[in-house]
Image: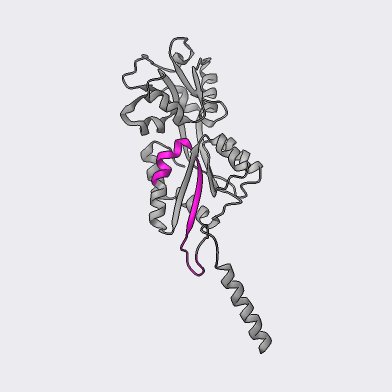
Amino acid sequence: MRTIGAVAAAVAVTMGLAGCGSDAATSAPGTDRLSGTVTVFAAASLTETFTTLGHDFEAAHPGVKVVYSFGGSSALAEQIRQGAPADVFASAAPATMQQVVDAGEVTAKPDTFVSNRLEIAVPKGNPGTITGLADFGRPGPRIALCAVQVPCGAAAEKVFRIAGITPQPDTREQDVKAVLTKVILDEVDAALVYRTDVQAAGDKVQGIDFPESGQVINTYPIAPLATAPNAAAAAAFVDYVHSDPAKKVFAAAGFDTP
């Protein structure tokens, strides 16, 4: 009996220690209550929608704080591969996500949660009198594009190949928000950004659609990371991104959902 009692006491101590964790702890034993911080690395074009979803997620899980790092998907992927602590990665293209998968940083299969397409953005009033994609091949207009390494830049390259246009950009930026800022500040006459970014900018810019945009669709995958400090909250956040309330937020912002 003394032996059984000793074993029971040891188990009780072990369970007590297991319940003690860091600020990134998951749920309390016997409950589904999440706690700690969930760090999300997300493509810059998700800034507005993910910020909204973060507030909603925190409201649903009062013990959790969502922290974001927004930027170019390629730069974020490289940071993850170099060991940056993060729980979730949401990329603007499967190719960038695959880099993280190949590095062993994602063990679950990434899921597509939205898609997006490019649109021409011009300053308010369209001072450069831009009418379509062909203007990107003329020497006159001041043009901004994403760097080819990031998804919005890779999509732009595909669009130009389809249209048979050789662009003459004056600047290439490391993420789509930096490109959009050039337009807002009237530093360029036109840029290629996502249609969701044009919508998010409101009356600060004008959008011009073009036929080839429908032939190049960017799909966005998301996945919890293998070394996530807060695995439970990471999984819950990914699930929430696929939820019906989240789909309404994406649709309102101009994204297409599966």
Q: Is residue 153 visible?
A: yes
At which x and y percent is residue 28?
50, 66
Q: Residue at x 52, y 60 (%)?
A: 26
At which x and y percent is residue 157?
54, 23
Q: Is residue 205 magenta?
A: no
Q: Is residue 144 left or right of residue 81?
A: left
Q: Nearer the viewer, residue 17 or 218?
A: 17
Q: Residue at x 52, y 57 (%)?
A: 24
- Residue at the right extreme, as displayed: 3
Give the tally of numbered discs: 0
Q: Is residue 242 visible?
A: no
How does the figure colour the protein chain or chains? Answer: one colour
Q: Nearer the viewer, residue 122 or 166?
A: 122
Q: Is residue 53 above or below residue 7?
A: above
Q: Is residue 200 left or right of residue 90?
A: left
At which x and y percent is residue 222?
53, 44
Give the position of the N terminus as an image quadrant.
bottom right
- Residue at the bottom extreme, as displayed: 1
> In which quadrant of the rendered view does residue 249 lie?
top left
Q: Residue at x 44, y 31 (%)?
A: 177
Q: Is residue 185 above or below residue 49?
A: above
Q: Is residue 54 above or below residue 47?
A: below
Q: Is residue 45 magenta?
A: yes
Start and end of the magenta stretch?
28-52
At which x and y percent is residue 232?
53, 57
